[in-house]
Image (spheres, rainbow, N blue to C red):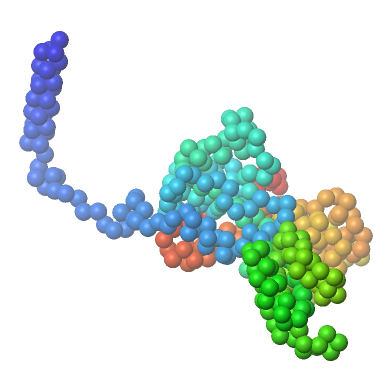
Amino acid sequence: MWGRMLWRNLVGRTLSCKLFTSLCKNISPKRCKPQRISAKTLSTTVPTKMADLAKVVTVLNNFAPPSLAESWDNVGLLVEPSPPHKVSRMLLTNDLTEGVLAEAVEKKANLILSYHPPIFVPLKRLTQSSWKERIAVRCLENCIAVYSPHTAYDAVKGGVNDWLAAGLGVGQVEPLHTSVQPHPQGHVFLLEVCVDKPAAVALQEKLAALQQGEVTMQDVTAGSRGDCIKINMRCSQHALVQAVNCVNQTLGDKAVTSLQVVKLEKPPLPGAGMGRLVTLDVPVTMSDLLSRVKTHLRLNHVRLGMGEGRTLEGSTVRSVALCAGSGGSVLKGVKADVYLTGEMSHHDILDAVAMGTSVILCEHSNTERGFLRVLQGQLTAMLDGKVEVMVSDVDKDPVEVV
């Protein structure tokens, strides 16, 4: 048996060598010359630059911190393949559908930035029974990470809502609901204690030993209290209980008159927030405004709810309140000549129209998707050209006007 196998291998190799030799004899030397591959050709076939996923996520988080997102949202890195994971190509999409995922696999993307989070309602299993479960499974099978910014991009200055406002004309733009900055290190309370100098050092050491916040001391000369040392401690709500117990144990009855707790307010973040109010420098007719919206969003048709007493040509528009996507809750009660959003409920439209505010509806994702082209250039620059940033050709709003 072994003899037969050895004989077959030898014969096979001999035939292969003879066949290769005969083929080479029939090929002219000119045709056998090695072909030169240009750098341009090589760059389109083999990625020469890439970045670590963690560094890419840091860049994305710095552009629009997840803390800007609404509390109910699910933003940030949603799918993470096993490390190390390198990113050479990133695909931008408004919605991650199975069609977009197939496009990402075909284009060899290592990261998908999906504006809407594909994982929103918690998944209890990963099977083939639903399209969102299949997407999560296939992303992991193909080593594709998924990042979603959603309402963080709505709120950030220079994000989706500012892009939407840019198509209306020259004017002042401000958030409808201003975002606030997060507390440093999660410190939401300020504990203040005024004590005499002998007790100050001991109390400071005990508070610092808790390792639960930032403790500082300051000499104070103040009226009725006389000379004393003010000890400040910034801390979380959890640490506040421990700090107050520490003060009570150290100062005893004196703690009642010397202890003060202040809840820290989050400072506003200028230019960031949900929705935008656009006040045009030069008022326009409703007809002109509709033309601007259609041109900016590249739409042939929009839906219009005309406010009471308003007309297309006879009424001027100076103020526009807008919210990309579904703007019913953000726009509700805002005083403006026009509401611009993707979708609103029937009853919210009735309320707006009754108070004289016209409503322009463009379908949900049509008010968001165009920002991806702007984002493409921004991310390319922020990542120093190390990642090829692409915009999906498949992604589109599921609703069409027919």
Name the residue located 47 percent from the left edge and 54 percent from the top edge.
Answer: 53
How far across and how far down the image is residue 104, in percent?
Answer: 49, 45
Q: Is residue 221 left or right of residue 167?
A: right
Q: Where is 279 relative to 360, above or below?
A: below
Q: In this view of the protein, which residue sits in the foreground, 204 or 138? A: 204
Given residues 259 and 129, the one toward you in this image is: 259
- Residue at the extreme top of the image, as rendered: 1
**x and y, in percent, of residue 273 in the image:** 72, 66
Judge left or right: residue 150 versus residue 350: left
Q: Is residue 79 visible?
A: yes
**Where's the C terminus, which quadrant?**
top right
Residue in the image at 72% along x and 80% along y: 198
What residue is shown at x 58% (from left), y 58% (from top)?
372
Q: Residue 172 is drawn in which quadrant? A: bottom right
Location of residue 9 by image quarter = top left
Q: Is residue 91 left or right of residue 362?
A: left
Can I make out residue 373 in this image? no
Q: Residue at x 81, y 56 (%)?
A: 329
Depth order, front residue of 296/183: 183
User: How many numbered marks appear?
Assistant: 0
What x and y, as percent, mark residue 42? 30, 54
The percent position of residue 374, horizontal first and vertical second, equals 56, 64
Q: Quadrant of the N terminus?
A: top left
In the image, farthest residue toward the front: 198
